[in-house]
Amino acid sequence: MPVGTAATVKGISTPQLAETGAQMVLANTFHLHLQPGEAVVAAAGGLHRFMGWSGPLLTDSGGYQVFSLAAINRIDDGGVLFRSPRDGSRHTLTPETSMRIQMALGADVAMAFDQCPPYPASESEVAEACRRTHHWLERCVAEHSGDGQALFGIVQGGCFPALRLASAQRVAALDLPGIAVGGVSVGEPVEEMHRIVRLLGPVLPEAKPHYLMGIGSLREMAIAVAQGFDLFDCVLPTRLGRHGSALVGGERWNLRNARFREDHTPLDERCPCLACRQHSRAYLHHLLRSEEMLGRTLLSLHNLTTLLRFSDAMAQAIQEGCFSEDFAPWDPASAAARTW
Amino acid sequence: MPVGTAATVKGISTPQLAETGAQMVLANTFHLHLQPGEAVVAAAGGLHRFMGWSGPLLTDSGGYQVFSLAAINRIDDGGVLFRSPRDGSRHTLTPETSMRIQMALGADVAMAFDQCPPYPASESEVAEACRRTHHWLERCVAEHSGDGQALFGIVQGGCFPALRLASAQRVAALDLPGIAVGGVSVGEPVEEMHRIVRLLGPVLPEAKPHYLMGIGSLREMAIAVAQGFDLFDCVLPTRLGRHGSALVGGERWNLRNARFREDHTPLDERCPCLACRQHSRAYLHHLLRSEEMLGRTLLSLHNLTTLLRFSDAMAQAIQEGCFSEDFAPWDPASAAARTW
């Protein structure tokens, strides 16, 4: 899922977004609550109509951003009292308000309001966050009233296997339409994250979609897909694009680099995106050196297209029996080369 | 002509640019000479291929930017020695180098290298700039070698009718494929500019395209079209768009204004652009308030579309015999209302 924080994937129009192959898009409840406010979005007819995206949408709960972006005034079992980073105004987010905001936004999937502990955190801190997350989840379920919107629960537990397994069991027991793993990609070593993915993949309810939150690098997606995960979100492709980096064949290239100045070949010959189809590395380099908006848009389009092609290639490779967790289909020696 | 200063109309992809109805696009020789340099553009196969625009292109001579943007070290009959505003490096622009750079860029139309005096300037200063402009024009003609590229001459003369008429006669005598009026929109009162347009329109060679440089507001275009002008360029639609303003029915609206916060109607119901077709005033307001790139892109698209629709409406009204210099087809009482 490309990330459309403020009801827009940064720099990308919705027809361009559809061209990347994107299906489901994520938007941030925290940002939309502060600006323009869920009442404006609801009056527009919901998030789909407000942002002009008819495909599936998912909103997060606001919890992660409250803990990472806002000045927290108080946190207890009731919820979180915080100040807006926009204007210093006071706001409260609770399981109930998160559900009401998300219902007003009207995405296809709402996420439970959870507490995501930082990394590192002690086992007792993480256990306390799990206890609160499970308590909040029950309140989310009580407050949420379907109406065409699915609610997904979130497994926490940090890097502690016993807490992770217990959390997975608690969340799975509620039999919600989807299940997510949160509290990853919060600063832990990547090997820790792989360990959690390998631990939880096999025990999550098989018939439900599995969502690994905040992950979007190619290697981590392939490892998680090998463990049965289905959904991912990450700002990486658009953030890299805005900073002048392109994903090409498993590498990251800085297009500002002087070696691209007179390189008149396409960025990635096999990529169908506008940047690769219509322009050269030299032109993209020139746009970035000139601080032109179009450079950031074109690289964002390319990076999104690359991640979505990678997802499609994984799906095809699974069907054809040539998928493995070291999936790198751009390598001519890969058994899955025909999927790229 | 939308302005694509650095080989990109700011924030607009070339498929989006085609959707606005744009045909001819202007690019700036001064900027492209400094970055990436005409050799890179030539090696890419010329400006059309470099920027991915297959429609007609025009490059200006670099003269206007040298005088308005650069630190001038010396100006004499030979040319201009200046420092780059990018990195302080020294450059010389002469009629010959301007022609060689523009030939390397390879647009469909090149402009003669002229001296555009500031406003206000004394009659003797303007007369001196005219003398130099005519002398440089002869050198441009001698240096320029067609090869599919047309060279247009430029009439100067400031706000002095006798100098303007003499300049028009000198430039017209060279029988070039097009003729431009420069030195307008340089700070003079708008009435002075109208006076020059009304003076020169009737005396310019009728069979050649007439290009009024740097003009792009609706009223000024209509007055100039009534005097036989055909071509215009202006950064106004994209600059206004980047700053959050939209052209609607002859007015300029600041979409950041709180009155648009809960206005879920289209920006302009009769406009076919993406911003009007797919989004609401409330959404555009939200994007601008959130400092999202997409807001600037959508308003730029809308403003370009509005100017190009206005041009098309003028063409249709001329054919139908209902064109007048106070052309305002959005007014239901206008005789030309059916052209909007």
Image (cartoon, coloured by chain):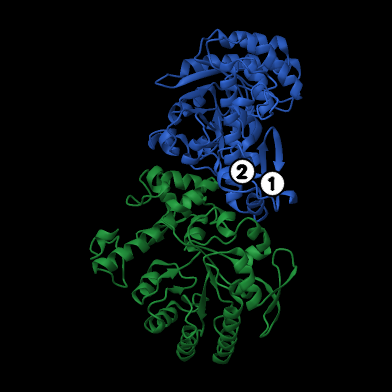
Chain colours: A blue, B green
Circle 1: residue type: Leu
Q: Residue sitting at 44 percent across and 26 percent down?
A: A103
Tell me which corner region of the image, top left, top right, bottom left or bottom right, holds residue A90: top right
According to the picture, the residue beneath numbered tag 1 turns out to be A255
Residue B225 in picture, x, y percent from top left: 36, 72
Give the side of residue B189 with respect to residue B147, left or right: left
How far is disc 1 from disc 2 in space, using C-alphas? 9 Å
Tell me which corner region of the image, top left, top right, bottom left or bottom right, holds residue B35: bottom right
Given residues A72 and A137, the one toward you in this image is: A137
Q: Residue sitting at 59 percent across and 48 percent down?
A: A279
Q: Residue sitting at 39 percent across and 66 percent down?
A: B218
Q: Relative to residue A113, is residue B281 depicted above or below?
A: below
Q: Which chain letter matches label 2?
A: A
According to the picture, the residue beneath numbered tag 2 turns out to be A299
- Residue A168 visible within the image: yes
Neighbor class of circle 1 (other Cα within 10 Å; few <14, some 14-19, many 20+) is many
Given residues A60 and B131, the one toward you in this image is: B131
Q: Are marks 1 and 2 in contact (CB under 8 Å)?
A: yes
Q: Is mark 1 on a helix, strand or loop?
A: loop
The quadrant the C terminus of chain B occupies is: bottom left
Neighbor class of circle 2 (other Cα within 10 Å; few <14, some 14-19, many 20+) is many
